[in-house]
Amino acid sequence: MSRTTKKVLIAILLLLISYVHYRTHAYHSVLHVVHRELYLVPILFAAYWFGKKGGLTIAGVSSLMFLPKILTVEGASSAYGINNLLEIMTFFIVAYLLGHYQDVRHSHWRSFFRSARPTTREVPQKYGSKVMVCFDNSPNARKAIQYVVDTFLKLENTEVSVLGFIRDPSGDAFPSQEQYRNARAENERTVVGLVDEARRMLLDGGFIEHAISTGTVRIQRESLASRIIEEQRRLSCDTVIMPGTRMSKTEELILGNPAVKLVREADFTIVTVY
């Protein structure tokens, strides 16, 4: 559905609800309560499709369209009017919360590259025989590979499995299907390119060819952490290396941090490279 179509749909919903609302006699207070709740439908659509700004805008428009009919009812108690005013606040609360969530989620998908500061921790030498390096389109993927070269090359008989995880971005984060398809293809090219580059870096670093294996894994709704655990068990790796992602507290709360979740659930050695 195009951006324009979404706007038209929201406008039609607002007009239909307002038409029924103003055609209903004032003394049908229960029906007007129903109409008030119906205004949440276009507000939810606006916040989901257009983020916080769109949701709050439609919340304001809905309030302006709903309140005049209610506040001009003759003989209505002050409590009735105050109750409606308080309930209208839910329009803005819902619009803000859902819109903010969508803004954070969309910015996460649109941001393919971030700057970060490298930090690592030492790995005991007894864990090094089979290493799995896993990443998506993280900017720290190269740092993770370099860490493997610097740390594990000196250990004898080390095998390295490089896995690139491809997660399709959310279609709602893009105004059109064409932009979504382009972003999806770009994301896949980025991950595949990082996997190929990782192989070259390992070879250039001194690993022999038969000690390196590469592949890509497409993930849908499952979490990155759970899929990494699944692949670790399949490959029987001793150590998992993954690039870390710098996230704000809001992003961690809403989106979750794969590295933190992996550490919490895994029973094997994990190194996160920033």
Image (cartoon, rainbow, N blue to C red):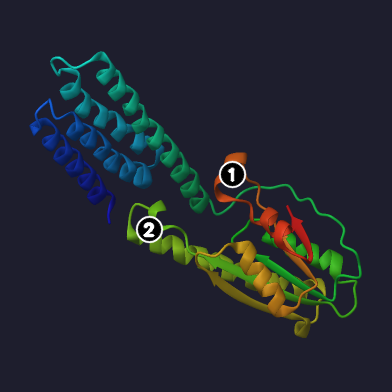
Depth check, front residue: 12 or 132: 12
Q: Which circle marks residue 46 in the picture? A: none
Depth check, front residue: 256 or 201: 256
Q: Is residue 68 visible?
A: yes
Q: Is residue 7 left or right of residue 108?
A: left
Callout 2 secondary element:
helix
Q: Residues within 10 Å of mark 2 (few under 14, many from 20)?
A: few
Residue type of the residue flagged with mark 1: Leu
Tell me the quadrant of the picture where the N terminus can be found.
Answer: bottom left
Depth check, front residue: 166 or 236: 236
Q: Position of residue 94 (x, y in %)?
A: 39, 36
Depth check, front residue: 26 or 133: 26
Which residue is identified by label 2? 179
Q: Residue at x 33, y 56 (%)?
A: 176
Which residue is identified by label 1? 253
In this rendering, which labeled residue sits more in front, label 2 or label 1? Answer: 1
Q: Position of residue 131 (x, y in %)?
A: 78, 72
Q: Residue at x 57, y 71 (%)?
A: 192
